[in-house]
Image (cartoon, rainbow, N blue to C red):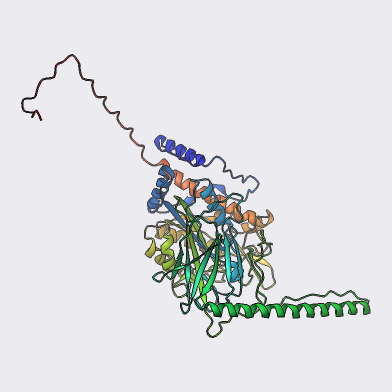
């Protein structure tokens, strides 16, 4: 609190002096060893001025100077954002340093149950069998929401945990409200939140297709299981699955021992060295909490081991999660958390491989319904790397798709400010498995500037800042980018997050510098003391009563 008060005091002085506010004293950015980065371009550009940012800036003013209110930010994109390294870096700066307060984590999801990478800023674990549906698949079987992903289960033992402070040296999140967006196919399953040793059944809000939980005290871990209305059926099926797994494990262990014994005998009979590989069955569900998985799409980070390993929540199933007749089923599309404290809420929304149309109503019909709880004051658009990964880039179609998405957002937040983040430079692989420069980065960049002009938005020209066409190879040589020349390594994402944060704060400081100086209040006149030597005269018109 002392740090927040100091920053507020410094900012207040700057307003009176009409000078730019200083950045937090503990924030530095050394780019001296990266000569290919054009730091002179690291700013939020406003082709049509920053008038559309006034509502956002005023909310920041209220938070910074009066310690009141909440500022909500949405950063939406593809794998760059699902990984949440760059966006996580921006969030960390905002809630720790400037102005240094968290209003809640916003939207999160049990990505491990979907068998894809969890954002790097929190932990995700699961039990049981889950099916996944997301907006980048050819066939989307579930109505999706803001996050563009859903998981379903009919496993009576299913459970998941989201640990918000798992990777924070010092706790950041202390949530007082949790809302789970999802539904039971037949209304026969209730999600249950576990807090300490207490089980809190969710209360259905049918209008928003969500469940709320009365929390006895602030929490930073979300542990959800499911209660079937037919408790006997739930117990019987759970027992049956557990017994089947036990028998299956015994059979697999015996088969493995027999295979190893035979292999040992074979090695004795052969002079050649042989390597015995034990295959993992296709139907074994493994917990995933790593950042860079799923190589089926271009917008997926590759070739780097996960920085964090999750603690397993075994045992896990080897059976199928196909819906059985009469078995209850529950689907989750998102979890929204917030606190009662004033501050900044910064939500990342990203799916590996996502393009702009992947967030359309045909794919995500509940997008606006869930976005209404966030109602962002600022939206940062980072979708485009997949849209431009084609031989012939339809720039007009690209902008038309953004028009459709922006219309959806403006229905919920008509006063939201927009920042367009241009694509990073990238390479594409030829049939000969060689990487060549991808010129569509420059074409897409022009489209982003046209969009910024149209919507009176800001634009952060990442393409030019990182060095323009061909610069990705320099980032790779500097150990900032991956071999695929599309994605960045942790250091690269963190550096981009630092750059964006600095540009955003500079834009806000420019706003502060242009605020009119407050006129000092005139001193109030001191009332004169009555002369005790004078005898008060009577007022003839005043009643003696």
Q: Residue furthest left?
A: 540
How many numbered circles does the render carry?
A: 0
Residue situated in front as seen by the camera: 236 or 537: 236
Q: Residue furthest top?
A: 533
Residue situated in front as seen by the camera: 230 or 172: 230
Q: Residue at x 39, y 70 (%)?
A: 207
Q: Residue at x 27, y 24 (%)?
A: 526
Relative vertical location of residue 30 with respect to residue 156 in this rendering, above or below: above
**Residue 398: where, in percent of width, then height?**
47, 68
Residue situated in front as seen by the camera: 243 or 187: 243
Q: Residue furthest bottom?
A: 325
Which picture quadrant has residue 372? Answer: bottom left
Look at the image and tell me whether residue 381 can be seen. Answer: no
Which picture quadrant has residue 29? Answer: top right
**Residue 520: where, in percent of width, then height?**
33, 32
Residue situated in front as seen by the camera: 518 or 249: 249
Q: Residue at x 61, y 73 (%)?
A: 128
Left or right, 374 with respect to 494, comes to: left
**Residue 75: where, in percent of width, then height?**
50, 59
Q: Dividing the image into 4 quarters, which one contains the C terminus? A: top left
Look at the image and tell me whether residue 269 can be seen. Answer: yes
**Residue 429: where, in percent of width, then height?**
65, 69
Relative vertical location of residue 458 with respect to residue 134 in this rendering, above or below: above
Relative vertical location of residue 523 with respect to residue 74 in this rendering, above or below: above
């Amino acid at each position: 609190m002392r740090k927040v008060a100091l920053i507020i005091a410094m900012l207040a002085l700057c307003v009176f002096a009409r000078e730019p506010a200083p950045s937090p004293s503990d924030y530095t950015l050394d780019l001296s060893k990266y000569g290919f980065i054009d730091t002179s371009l690291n700013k939020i550009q406003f082709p049509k001025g920053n008038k559309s940012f006034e509502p956002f800036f005023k909310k920041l003013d209220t938070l910074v100077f009066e310690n009141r209110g909440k500022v909500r930010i949405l950063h939406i994109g593809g794998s760059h954002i699902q990984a949440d390294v760059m966006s996580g870096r921006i969030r960390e700066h905002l809630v720790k340093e400037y102005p240094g307060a968290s209003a809640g984590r916003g939207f999160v999801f049990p990505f491990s149950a979907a068998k894809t990478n969890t954002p790097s800023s929190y932990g995700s674990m699961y039990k049981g069998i889950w099916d996944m549906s997301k907006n980048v698949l050819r066939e989307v079987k579930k109505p999706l929401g803001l996050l563009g992903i859903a998981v379903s289960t009919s496993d009576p033992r299913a459970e998941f945990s989201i640990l918000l402070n798992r990777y924070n040296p010092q706790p950041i999140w202390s949530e007082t409200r949790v809302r789970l967006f999802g539904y039971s196919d037949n209304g026969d399953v209730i999600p249950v939140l576990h807090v300490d040793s207490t089980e809190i059944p969710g209360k259905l809000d049918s209008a928003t297709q969500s469940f709320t939980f009365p929390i006895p005290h602030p929490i930073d871990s979300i542990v959800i299981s499911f209660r079937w209305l037919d408790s006997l059926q739930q117990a019987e099926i759970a027992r049956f699955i557990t017994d089947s797994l036990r028998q299956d494990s015994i059979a697999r262990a015996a088969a493995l021992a027999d295979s190893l014994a035979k292999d040992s005998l074979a090695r004795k009979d052969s002079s050649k060295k042989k390597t015995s590989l034990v295959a993992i069955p296709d139907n074994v569900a493994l917990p995933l909490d790593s950042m860079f998985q799923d190589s089926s799409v271009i917008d997926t980070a590759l070739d780097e081991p996960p920085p964090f390993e999750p603690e397993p929540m075994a045992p896990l199933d080897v059976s199928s999660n196909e819906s059985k007749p009469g078995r209850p089923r529950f689907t989750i599309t998102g979890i929204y958390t917030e606190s009662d404290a004033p501050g900044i809420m910064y939500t990342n929304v990203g799916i590996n491989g996502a393009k702009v149309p992947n967030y359309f109503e045909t794919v995500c019909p509940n997008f606006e319904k869930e976005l209404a709880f966030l109602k962002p004051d600022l939206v940062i658009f980072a979708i485009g790397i997949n849209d431009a990964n084609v031989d012939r880039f339809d720039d007009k179609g690209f902008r038309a798709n953004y028009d459709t998405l922006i219309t959806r957002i403006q229905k919920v937040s008509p006063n939201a400010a927009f920042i367009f983040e241009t694509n990073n430079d990238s390479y594409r692989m030829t049939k000969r498995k060689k990487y060549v420069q991808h010129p569509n980065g420059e074409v897409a960049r022009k489209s982003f500037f046209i969009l910024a002009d149209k919507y009176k938005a800001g634009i952060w020209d990442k393409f030019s800042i990182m060095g323009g066409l061909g610069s990705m190879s320099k980032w790779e040589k500097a150990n900032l980018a991956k071999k695929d020349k599309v994605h960045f390594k942790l250091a690269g994402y963190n550096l981009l997050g630092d750059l964006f944060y600095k540009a955003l704060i500079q834009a806000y400081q420019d706003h502060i510098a242009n605020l009119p100086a407050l006129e000092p209040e005139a001193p109030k006149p001191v009332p004169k003391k009555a002369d005790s030597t004078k005898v008060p005269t009577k007022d003839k018109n005043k009643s003696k009563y």
